Image (cartoon, rainbow, N blue to C red):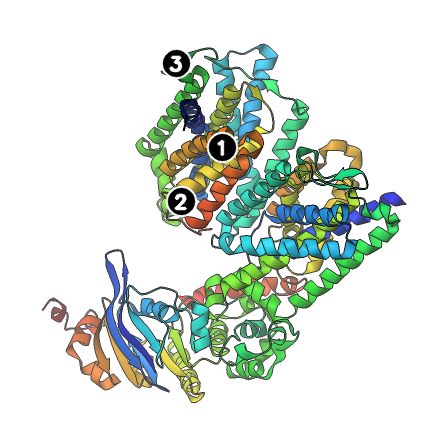
Amino acid sequence: MDFYFGLLQIFGVHTLLGLSAYVVLLTGQVTMAQAGFYAIGAYSAGAATAMFGLHILPAVILAGLVTAGIACIVGFPALRVKGLMLVVATLAFGEMVRLFFFNLTWQVERGGEMVGPNGAEGFRAIRYFPENGWEVWHVTVFIWIVVAVIMAALWWMDHSRAGAVLRAVGHDETAAQSVGLNLTAVKVGAMTLGGFIAGVGGGIYAHTVTHIEHGVFGVLLATFAIAYPILGGLGSVFGTVIAVLFIQGFLIEGLRFVGDWRSLLFGALIVVAMNLRPHGLLGEHAPNLRRIFGREKTEREALNTKEAK
Amino acid sequence: MLALDNLSKHFGGVRAVDAVDLTFREGEIFGLIGPNGSGKSTTVNLITGLYTPTTGTVMLDGHDLTQMAQHERTAMGVARTFQNIRLFGNLSVAQNLWVAQNGRTQRREHFMSRWFKAGGEHGPEIEDLLRFSRLHTKRDLPASALSFGEMRRLEMARALASNPRIVLLDEPAAGASLEDGQLLAERIRDIRERGVTVLLIEHMMELVMGISDRIAVLNFGRKIAEGTPAEVQANRDVRAAYLGSKHEDEELIHA
Amino acid sequence: MDYFFFIDFLQSLTDGLLFGTTYALIGIGFTLIFGVMRKLNLAYGAAALAGTYIGLAAFLSFDAPPTLVFLLSALGSGVIGILVYYCCFRFTPADYPMASLLASVGMLLFIEEVVIHASHGMPFPYPSVFRDATIELGDIWIRGDLLFVFGICVVAMAVLFWLLYRTPLGLATRAVSQQPRAAALCGIDPTRVNLLTFGITGILGGIAGAMTAAAVGVLSPIIAMGLTVKGLIAVVIGGLGSIPGAIIGGLLVGAAENIFLLLRGVTERDIYVMLLLFLFLVLRPGGLFGSTAGRD
């Protein structure tokens, strides 16, 4: 039974990771920084509970806020570059964060033990859950309540003007500017919100595994982060969840018997998916819209080009 | 109302727009014409802030827009359409209008209700614009599923969604037939009826001559004539520069 | 500043500049592919790594001489480059760069995993030449193997320049990178040019991988990430799309890396290299030679 709860916990934290990238991807920005934000959230939430004895809830919110702040600061300069250059910039930022924690040693004494990040050793003994008598299913429920709250908030945002604005910026920046949208504000806003979600996700992740080290937050994790929303499609938040269930569930846990070949399969899956369904499993638009209008659209486009001449 | 003073834009050695002075009056339809590459679209891009001018200023009722970002100019009341239609194809027709509500009055609304109130795409202003552009039956279709003419109408409505004081129409008749041109002329008059000044950049002579109150002619980035349609048509330089290549007074160009 | 530090500094700088030519080669690869396709091939470093392992396999199985090992590394990487083209670029939509980008990341993970499994993640000795030779210039020593790396990379660049500027193939490649549609109308098959570009850049990557391994003396899967990231940094510093920019960027990265190694130690070295990249992206997004700022 615990195995399945553990699985649900993995789904939960990865959903948060994917959603954090989803928000940024809506504005058309491909970010490889989410693993870095996740790491910042993990280390700061871990520090808050293990080193300073905070309750888990304020610790996780604090982690989200710290990460959001950093995402906002990084967002201003980073979003000056677009497209592929942004991929490189955020990749560099992510690696920078990872290497920072690789070098970070900052320990305090608590209960006769030294706790805190210890360089390459990582950050051990983030034991808030076992110390406070939380059982596995408590933790799982807690994680999914957080996921549900964030998903509901994002779903709401998607149906408000803010969501339409994010998509408008993602579709055509020049047109978005011409209708009076402040690109910098919109993009940095999305980056900050994405940072908050990644920080919360990382903070929870740190407590489910109790031991974090820099190696986890590498390019693989950054790829997972953007692969969920891109594979799921940017139509709605549910695409991301479905992609998490699909990749983590089917590929990683379902194929456990194939042993260590899992990240190889993950790589192959992305390659195949991008060839067959480049706009994601559920498509770019909200589900069903595209299906219904897909054929009509192509006919019309043919007509349009005729008209244009 | 809107005044361009000594406005220039140089791309390397090319003077796309060269020391242009223009003043647009409240409530008029102003036609800006000129041969291909004469700097019409560059002028639009300078007014809306897509380019920063090499020299000169753009003033709106005494406010200097020259250093403002595009979104700030929209908030001041400048809106535009594009020569090659640029809609948000991934959004619905109504949502295209919704995201464009960034005008003077709209910006004063409360932050939360402006950004996070769901269902705002059913607001009265949007319904009005949908009827204006005769797209209310297609309000929930993705904009990419519209026909060419519908896209043009939607883009025009989107420009109006921010409650602008002046709207810049960049070749709205491009790709349209002559009959469409008649409908377009009516629609442009409708825009003026709403109290919005219109700057019309166009190739289709019949359209511009028919509805403009005043016209300015650009050639090689310079303003070579300005006045009523009749005055401009009578101007020798204009005939040489603009009509000359098509008509018999070919020799005037070389004169 | 005392004399010994000064000598150490110069020594680091020299080693860095010599070794930087491998980054320059990788950078040229990124730039060429970007030139013809306006896309980023993130699987490039991994393909270079896999090619190098092919050479290594020859070395381990029948004790091939270093020249053959290097040659096989380069050719193997070229073949894998073509494979990457078919898997990630040929059939993904041309107007949606994110699809091929993500596919190439997937390919990166895939190739890396294959290599790790095939080699059990263990580092292997890789043949090297002139290991014991050194040239002394005063108090500065120039390592023979590094000089060899430098020489091979320079030769590779020279051959590439000859290909690009003196052959019909190069003309076609440059035509596609300037105006893909016009080139297609002139009867140049873009697919063939793309294919050749991936093959050639693959060979360059293989040379870079082989030379990296030769300079270190051992080959381990870790170098893929290093090559990818450092190559990208070289390109960004030089300006995406510019070959001279990639060369200078590569040399700069090599030098900076070694100097930070001297000043801050091995664990912190890469933080500063990343910081350098981040600063460049923010302050001079077009790079030293590029005008493609913000292009996607």
Badge 3 and badge 1 both on one subunit: yes
**Which mark identifies residue C135?**
3
Mark nearer the N terminus (2 vs 3): 3
Q: The residue under label 3 is which amino acid type?
A: Ile
Q: Horizontal placement of C43 versus A125: left or right? A: left
- Whether residue C283 appears in this view of the structure is yes
The mark tally for this picture is 3
Measured Cα–Cα span from mark 2 to mark 3:
35 Å
**Vertical placement of residue B169 versus A91, above or below:** below
Q: Residues within 10 Å of mark 2 (few under 14, many from 20)?
A: many
**Disc 3 and disc 1 in contact, CB within 8 angstroms:** no
Question: Which is nearer the eye, B152 or A39?
Answer: A39
Mark nearer the N terminus (3 vs 1): 3
Label 1 sits on residue = C260
- Whether residue A283 appears in this view of the structure is no
Q: Residue at x 55, y 57 (%)?
A: A28
Badge 2 and badge 3 both on one subunit: yes
Residue C268 position in % (x across, y down): 56, 34
Could you say which quadrant of the image residue C31 lies in? Answer: top left
Label 2 sits on residue = C287
- The residue tagged with tag 1: helix, strand or loop? helix
Measured Cα–Cα span from mark 3 to mark 1:
24 Å
**Disc 2 and disc 1 in contact, CB within 8 angstroms:** no
**Disc 2 and disc 3 in contact, CB within 8 angstroms:** no
**Label 3: chain letter:** C
